[in-house]
Amino acid sequence: MVWVLGASWAIQGCLCWFYTRSLLRAPREGAKPRPEVLANPPRIRVIMPLRGADPFLRSAVRSVVENPYPRLELCVVLDRPNDPAEEIVRESLAGVDPGRFRIDFLRDHAPERSLVCSSVLQAYGDRQGAYDLLTFCAADTIVPQKWFWLLADAMSDPAVGSTLGNRWYQPVEGRWGSLVREAWNAGAAVVMWLCRIPWSGAAALRPDEVARSGLIDDWKRSLVEDVTIHDAMRRVGLRLAFVPELTNVNAEEVDLRGGFRFIKRQMLWARLYHPGWWFVLLHALSGGAAMILPVVASGVAVCRGDYASATILASSFLTYLVGLVVLWLWLENSIRHVVDANVMTLKRTPRRLLKMLAAIPLTQLLYPAAVISCHVARHVDWRGIRYDLIGRNTVKMVEYVPFEAEHHPADERTSI
């Protein structure tokens, strides 16, 4: 059993090593885009679908419209008039140049796709000739100043169909659900890089290639706008470029139940729309086995009176956990290399390190539970809307209802 733990850690360590090598190849602070991009920056439309008022919505909106990138249009698509997000959006945009934004309401709540995809299709189709690149911004994404320059520079390569980046969770308070999501995301970032699974917040697209690749048809029957980008760009012979600096630090909190729901949703998107799902499934189950089998074997040894073996197993298990914390901190330190230093100010106190140590086995158990749950799921509830999963590429909204106040977080830092 000891060798199982050692092999598990070694495999994860190797994956982390390859991932951090890619991160550390990122340009240092101050690197500039290509001269042709600086001379003629492409027009970028930023689509922000909204349903409910997320904790950092105000900051997310301001981070886009106040960004120094010169040719930028924020396209906000609200679920309906009087949605809780509307007042915050309008307040956030007061005094902003009207040419920097548009506010629209979702006109078609089509049942065969998610509200997010309906919003994306609407924003994509409006005045197509008015932009050269399309990207997305969620209500929890505070965009750094260099963000759109990075997107424009990567997309100046005609062989690139879209870009790859990710979120990095770093909750200040560190509730148990937040720590589980943080630990899970640290590992998921590596898997998403390896399997080329896009995250919409770091994805850029050319409008003509959206149509040519069949991505529009994907969006018309999909729950999410990003995971399907992988197959769509591959269909037209374009690659996804990993841009390490497109890593966005997120400080939202979540309770344990909310953290589990979040992981389950993310895994569901991979199950439905990405060809690497079986690798993700194997990754989750192997991590769970590495948690359960040593504990069971140690318990069996105690029952048999073999205390020497039980001690060895327990010591090896604790060493394995400490080793995973080391990998977590290693990834975090590498992330600091590519993001703005002002957003990664959290100090790792002894108390926080102990909580990380405890959060890892909890994460390693909840992760496979979430994967198994979504593997057999026949429906998903997302922001108060239930979608039935009829097949791999077929979903149906059971009933559209406006966003209810009961879905709002209890405080200003908690994710919806």
Image: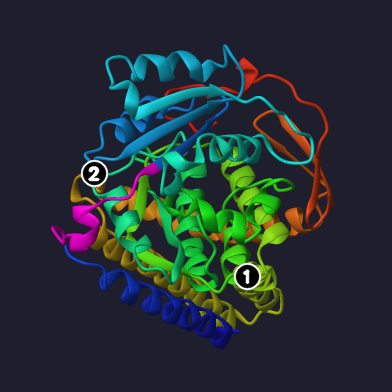
Q: Quarter of the image holding residue 15? A: bottom left
In which quadrant is the C terminus drawn?
Answer: top right
Q: How did the renderer colour the structure?
A: rainbow
Identify the mark at residue 145; answer none if there is no mark: 2
Residue position marked by numbered label 1 in the rendering: 235
- Tell me: 386 left or right of 95: right
Inspect the magenta stretch and tell me whether residue 400 lies in it.
Answer: no
Q: Position of residue 296 (x, y in %)?
A: 68, 71
Residue type marked 2: Gln
Is any atom of residue 349 visible in this view?
A: no
Structural crowding at the residue carrying mark 2, measured as other residues with C-alpha within 10 Å and reported as few (<14), some (14–19) or many (≥20): some
Q: Magenta stretch? A: 29-44
- For mark 1, give the secondary structure: helix
Q: Nearer the viewer, mark 1 or mark 2?
A: 1
Q: Residue 333 in the image: x percent, y percent?
A: 27, 63
Q: Secondary structure at mark 2?
A: loop
* Mark 1: few/some/many CA within 10 Å (<14, 14-19, 20+): some
Q: Is residue 93 visible?
A: yes
